[in-house]
Image: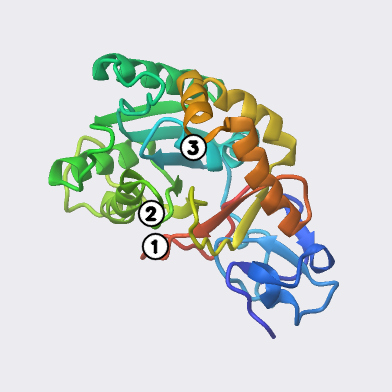
Amino acid sequence: MAIIPGYRLGPKHDMLPSVSHSDLPTDGICGMLSTLSPTTEFVACSGIVSPEIASPETLRKRTPMNVASIMAHQDDEMHCLGTLLKCHARGDRIAFITVTDGAKGFVQRPEIQPAEAARIRHQEMSELAHHLEAEYLNLREPDEFLYDTPEVRTRLIEAIRRTKAELIFTHYGEDYNLDHITVSSLVRHCAMQARLPVIATESAPLVEHPAIFMVSPHGPFVFPASHFVDVTAFEDEKIELLGLHRSQEEAMQQAVGAGFSRLCRRLDGYWGQAVGCDYAEAFVPMRARGAIKPYNVLP
């Protein structure tokens, strides 16, 4: 039988979004599916499970889960917020962790004092987190000057342990912004160390290594999307919540000529068209020890 990375073959599970092969294009990312039967069903999964041994219990992680978005800046959750809303709807506990203070995000007000800029970014992210009943942890490292240091690693390990993260969303390893790339690298290392007892922090080590998925990057990068979440029912709410980042809506309009609605609907619509729904968010699992699971964790 054919095994496709990131998918299992067999009957749908009623809690998981699925698409038929007949809805998928036969070129690009999905071209590898073209040799399979048109009636084959695909279900997004964080691991590969043989249908001969598959069961509902092994194909999904128990819910509710502890889900964490770990990003460089306040508003970087824009490429997974629909999925986070879907996680929240199924009863998961959500946490947002930002590593920098976001103080350099004011292209429309370059004269603003860093402390005031950081205060605004923190408040905007706090408002968004409140709508998801989420915990928000801000490590407040200097925006655009984020470095991988022992102190930063230790603080991020503690944040991951404090949230008891079982599922993490973070940046892809290639991106236009070095802060994003640094956070992706930090998450790879710190998620592993958060499970091990060798680096002491206030919170206890995790019981198990969290699953980790990386979001699609900004810019002209090849992103080998393999996992998709149908966020059609949450797209409008996602755009509304991102609007709470009022400073960044204004900044992006000035910097790139587009705000959250256009940027998100264009990309989410593209991924949705690829897998047969109106809007989808796309992910790649982080290939790190313990980060890929033999059961489904995505909503």
Numbered mark located on residue 290 in the image: 1
Q: Earlier in the sequence, mark 1 or mark 3?
A: 3
Numbered mark located on residue 224 in the image: none
Q: Residue at x 71, y 72 (%)?
A: 27
In the rendered image, the vertical position of residue 30 relative to residue 15, given as above or below: below
Q: Please identify, in this view, whether the residue under mark 2 or under mark 1 is nearer the observer.
A: 1
Q: Looking at the image, can residue 215 be seen?
A: yes
Q: Looking at the image, can residue 13 be seen?
A: no
In the rendered image, the vertical position of residue 32 relative to residue 256, given as above or below: below
Residue 31: which quarter of the image?
Answer: bottom right
Q: CA distance from mark 2 to mark 1?
A: 8 Å
Q: Please identify, in this view, whether the residue under mark 1 or under mark 3 is nearer the observer.
A: 3
Q: Residue at x 72, y 58 (%)?
A: 274
Question: Residue 276: where, in percent of width, then height?
Answer: 78, 55
- Left or right: where 263 falls relative to 13: left
* Quarter of the image with the N terminus in it: bottom right
Q: Amino acid at mark 1?
A: Gly
Which residue is nearer to you in this view: 286 or 224?
224
Q: CA distance from mark 1 to mark 3?
A: 23 Å
Q: Residue at x 52, y 25 (%)?
A: 249
Q: Circle 3 — which element?
A: helix
Mark 3 lies on residue? 77
Few, some or many residues within 10 Å of mark 2 (<14, 14–19, 20+): some
Q: Amino acid at mark 3?
A: Glu
